[in-house]
Amino acid sequence: MGHYTGIATRLRVKKTAEKRLFDFLDFLYQVGSNQTEQPEPKNQEQASLSEAINMVRRMLVNGSAYFECWEWRVKEDKGDFWLYESRASSTDWDLDTFISLLSGIRENLVLEDGDILLRSVYEESSVERVICFVNDEFKEERGFEFTTDHGYINDSRHPYRHERHSSEEPWDSTIRHDDDCNLPWKFEELKALVAEEKKERDANWHPWG
């Protein structure tokens, strides 16, 4: 089995978008009552597209014991737009494919410069990758840097190995669950936080740890 990557997304979709786009996003996020299934591919091109779509769906809905609290997705009415948000983890993911998806539906998204639409962090990595909207395009950038101790992640904001709160109720992946991540969803704010924490770590650095 491959290693898991935690993936969080946040998309704001205009209510003026066509119904078929909402049907498609409901299918990807596995939300809503009308989740249209994909037709069987009839040629290699359709088969490749179908596999790319299924990979994106796994990025949005899969779960694992390694990112136990990151297994939920919601579709919420925010007035002028629908908010699609998810937490998941997968061994099968590709940020370029997700950027292609965003580019294809761009005119239907509510976008502001600096918006972060996806953040991902490998189970043993201290640095996340983000997809953000900067200078009128979607870009993959270096994200937050979690603190480590002798190479081991010791930052409680890292979602790896967070256990679900004990409860007799079964876990419901179709409602929002609180997590300890709470990182900015604006790229400039994220960069400022990274710089501030790096400055503090450098000031407290000692050769013996």
Image (cartoon, helix red, strand yellow):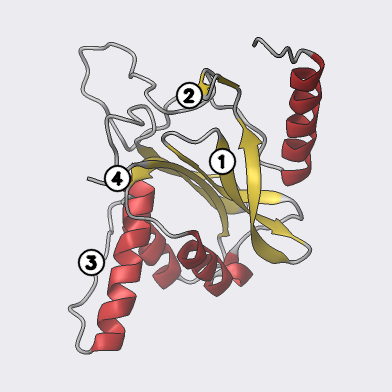
Please tell me which residue is depicted at 28% across the width and 52% down the height of the picture.
33
Q: Nearer the viewer, residue 70 or 17?
A: 70
Looking at the rendered image, the disc whose residue lies closer to the viewer, 2 or 3, is: 2
Residue 37: numbered disc: 3
Identify which amino acid the numbered label 1 is placed on. Answer: Glu
Q: From mark 3 to mark 4, how far is it between C-alphas?
A: 17 Å
**74 to 155, vertically: above or below:** below
Circle 3 packing at 10 Å, graded few (<14), some (14-19), many (20+), is: few
Q: Does the CB distance between marks 4 and 1 fall below 8 Å? A: no
Looking at the rendered structure, the secondary structure element under dot 4 is: loop
Q: From mark 2 to mark 3, how far is it between C-alphas?
A: 31 Å
Please tell me which residue is depicted at 37% across the width and 23% down the height of the picture.
161
Count up the numbered dots. Answer: 4
The earlier-in-sequence mark between 2 and 3 is 3
Please tell me which residue is depicted at 67% across the width and 35% down the height of the picture.
184
Q: Which residue is mark 4?
A: 62
Residue 128: numbered disc: 1
